[in-house]
Amino acid sequence: MCGIAGSLGIHLDRDPEAELHRMGAAIVHRGPDSGGVWLDRDAAVGLVHRRLAVVDLSPTGAQPMQSASGRYVCVFNGEIYNHLEIRRQLEASLGSSHWRGSSDTETLLASIESFGLEQAVRGWVGMFALALWDRQTRTLALVRDRFGEKPLYFGHSGSRFFFGSELKAIRAHSAFSPRIDREALALFFRHNYIPQPHSIFQGIAKLAPGSIAWVQPDSKNVRILAYWSAVEVARSRGRQPFKGSYDEAVTEVRQRLITAVREQTVADVPVGAFLSGGIDSSTVVALMQANSSRRVQTFTIGFGDDRFNEADHAKAVAAHLQTDHTELYLSGEQARELIPQLPRIYDEPFADVSQLPTCFVSQLARRRVTVSLSGDGADELFGGYGRFARAAQLIPWHQRLGVRGRRLVKSLIDSTLFVTGPTGELRLAGGSAGLQSRIRPVGRLAELLSQPDAPALYRSLLSYWKPPRNPVRHVTEPPTEFMEYANWLADGSAQEAVQMLDVITFLPDLVLAKVDRAAMRYSLETRVPMLDHRLAEFVWSLPVQYRANRHAPKRILKDILAPLVPPRLTDRPKMGFSVPIGDWLRGPLRDWAESLLDARLIERQGLLHAEPIRQAWQELLDRRADVGEHLWGVLTFQAWLGDVFPGGDPD
């Protein structure tokens, strides 16, 4: 795991080497072990790398690295889990004496020289973000892994082209002028994260998962190829479904998951795992322990509030598996100490409340290991989120209503019976607080069923601040994958559709981004066995009742785990990695929140409407509405804004 960055147009820089070093210094947390730069003044290209040594700790694994012929130079972030297998294949033509060291970076460069970039990348199993300079064609290629485990930003500012693992690397270049993209900001307040390809800055984008981008120093045109598409792969697998029995499917998924876990525990440094005590992480840890001669090191975060605490469950699973378990209980006061660091950790507005415990568990794990496995991705593959089942119920109702029925519901919403709350939710006009609370689900259902199509319904189900109450001034939301998804919905069941939508939106842009930034803040590499693409492709070939039955979610995983961990320890309602944010905002975080939500400050900044924000804040303080996560979005943005634009003028 490392950090990468670079620039085209370095001939315009007074001291290009110093600029590259500044970019690297901004992401030194991603690679504290060593760093290097490479530049070609004639071609006007510079690359920078920060190294967290995990495989091949010797200098032969250092980057930037040139290929054996000297044609290619690369900076690489990630791990290629099958690189030894690729080496064996290449040795038939290159010979065993070809290798200088044992790093996967050297292997991927050799595979590129042998097969070309597009063919080579399709053979890689792993997580990666790569920048590759072709000295022959004078072309820079940027590559991102299939699911988006590793981040990669890119774009033009003035006459220069920049890329980096994090925005802070790009911001470190003296020629970069940060300007807020208001459209991206509007998307942030809807989702509490910024969906790709957008970023918070104008001109800078996130490279989509499974993509390659090519750019040349003298051109502002960026050519992008999707070398792998989750949607297309799932469609093709669905057309050639698995024909075996359920028991045969369980056996195959188990074996593929064992392979993924075994490959991802290979490292030249200590490896552990996050453990919540739920199905996903318990499955990963159980398979790790079953295939290890040592006690696996496991880590969890707990809370004093039983509504959010899973530490006792994790401890019970750890005791059964006999892992070497470490836990830390988190308080609101500890959260208050971490909060000022969040803008620098997450680099752009990001507001999932589980980012706090994720930071703490990463810090906890890094004290003892350099690599940690997690159970992320299982919910998307095996139907674990409750919203999948809800969408599977609502979308058929929505379709049966037809255009006329949806218009009737919309007219009811627009009548005097309902009013719009400060965050855009529908409320009954008048009535006591108790009546409002009882009628709220009815208003929510009406709002969902009034949406023009099924993708809009699911987007609304996942929304926080909704029009007309999105607090960003003078902006219209741009289209996203949520609104360009009708073709997939036509091909399968509603639940399959929304699960896949999560795979291409929520998974890379929230789940994986959250873990990557938190873990890398503490120089911890995280690995995600559930997202081995070979496993995912097989899962998508299974009948939906095997892999994602809404009446029995995660059925296959439960049956894989049952022989290793008694179901009584793990089979319980999904809790999620959350925190009591409402209580914290009314308590230890109140002064901090009040300072950022000051109406005069918000109006002076000129980006947001203060009125709905202040209304929502008062309702939270009065316990009249559960809007803690809505306000967490505003607060994290305000904190980020003050950190990036300390002068107070974002324009």
Image (cartoon, rainbow, N blue to C red):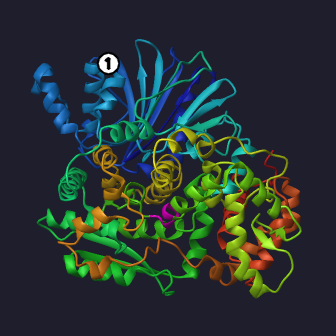
Could you say where residue 172 lies in the image, as x and y percent from the top left? 60, 42
Foreground residue among 555 and 186 = 555
Q: In this view, does 344 lie above or below 21?
A: below
Q: Position of residue 364 (x, y in %)?
A: 39, 70
- In the image, taking residue 4 as reference, residue 52 lies left or right, namely left
- Classify residue 231 as left or right of residue 160: left
Residue 192 in sight here: yes
**Residue at 31% across, 47% down:** 532
Q: Would you place residue 269 above or below residue 95 in this image?
A: below
Task: Report the residue at 15% width, 21% height from top.
Answer: 94
Can residue 470 be seen by looking at this rendering?
no
The residue wearing badge 1 is: 70
Residue in the image at 33% along x and 47% along y: 536
Disc 1, SS: loop
Structural crowding at the residue carrying mark 1, measured as other residues with C-alpha within 10 Å and reported as few (<14), some (14–19) or many (≥20): few
Q: Magenta stretch?
A: 385-389
Q: Where is residue 241 in the image (x, y as percent from the top left)?
A: 29, 43
**In the depicted view, which residue is nearer to us: 648 or 192?**
192
Q: Nearer the viewer, residue 56 or 349?
A: 349
Type of amino acid at the residue the image marks with label 1:
Gly
- Determine if the magenta segment contains residue 387: yes
Q: Residue 327 in magenta?
A: no
**x and y, in percent, of residue 62 in the image:** 32, 38
- Residue at the extreme top of the image, as rendered: 136
Image quadrant containing the C terminus = top right
Q: Is the magenta stretch mostly helix, strand or loop?
A: helix
